[in-house]
Amino acid sequence: MTNGPTGKVEKSTKFKTIKIRRSFAKKLSAVNPRDFNFLENQNFPAKICPVKFEKILLKISGETLAKNGSGVSFAALENLATEIAAAQKLKTKIAIVVGGGNFWRGRDFPQFPKNETDSVGMTATLLNGIILRNFFAEKKIAAEIFSAIDFQFARKFDATAAREFLNSGGIPIFVGGTGNPFFTTDSAAILRGRQLSVDLILKATNVDGVFEENPKKNPNAKKFEEI
């Protein structure tokens, strides 16, 4: 629990990571809410409420959707849609923040200005957003794209509209990161999670957690169990 700007106590949002292809629907139904500090004083009658989290935000890295490191894998989309549908059957409301690393990685172009490569990266997230929305539509899953920057094919982000869409049972797909260079889509996930007052943020990625630096380059990189 934290003190907000008004001095009132605000509910904290818990951040957890999940490995690629792990069933987060199963994870949601199995988790004990008392494992999470912000729920320690809440009463969750298990027999009445088998699902411990009403609203979650799922951060999906672009690489999670990739086929052989780039582009989009149909199998990855199919797996994601199956998990989303399973979680919705548990009455869990889901929001998504998607990255764009399967189309663009700014670090591969160090000769370009950082703010420019980040702008390309934010645009790349829109590609994944459009793909997800259309794939979900085929599966009869209601979804809408909300963007931090102006795109013709997405709604401009508005926290109230996004919350209303989430509460109606739809899946808001957030693209464009935070709308600013120098901030990752992970930062956007935390920001959108707080704006939507979700109970849990899950990160689907190709590394098992959040580290102080790239664990593939430094196997001794410190892993953060909580953020």
Image (cartoon, helix red, strand yellow):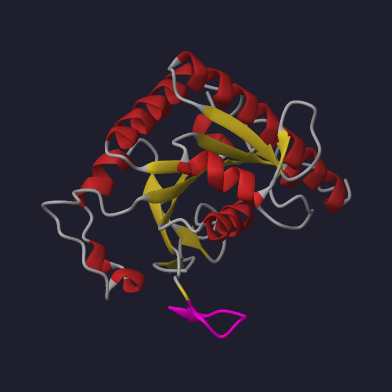
Image quadrant of residue 148? top right
Query: What is the number of callouts on the image?
Result: 0
8 or 107: nearer the viewer: 8
Residue 188, image x, y percentages: 63, 53
Q: Residue furthest bottom?
A: 7
Q: Is residue 126 left or right of residue 199?
A: right
What is the x, y in percent for residue 14? 41, 64
Principal secondary structure, stretch drawn in magenta? loop
| 166 in relation to 225, above or below | above
Does residue 100 sit above or below 223 in this rendering?
above
Q: Based on the displayed image, in which of its 4 quarters is residue 13 positioned? A: bottom left
What residue is shown at x 48% (from left), y 59% (from top)? 210
For the point 62% across and 50% down, the residue is 160
The answer to whether residue 206 of the structure is visible from this angle is: no
Image coordinates of residue 26 in percent, x first then y, are 24, 41
Residue farthest toward the left in the current orientation of the protein = 47
Give the extent of the magenta segment. Answer: 1-9
**Quick check: is 124 in the magenta stretch?**
no
Where is residue 103 drawn, in percent x and y?
68, 30
Which residue is depicted at the point 89% across and 50% down?
113
Which one is in front, 70 or 217?
70
The answer to whether 19 appears left or right of 113 in the picture is: left
Residue 3 falls inside the magenta stretch: yes
The N terminus: image quadrant: bottom left
| Any part of residue 143 in sight | yes
Q: Name the residue located 50 percent from the left edge and 62 percent from the top edge.
A: 211
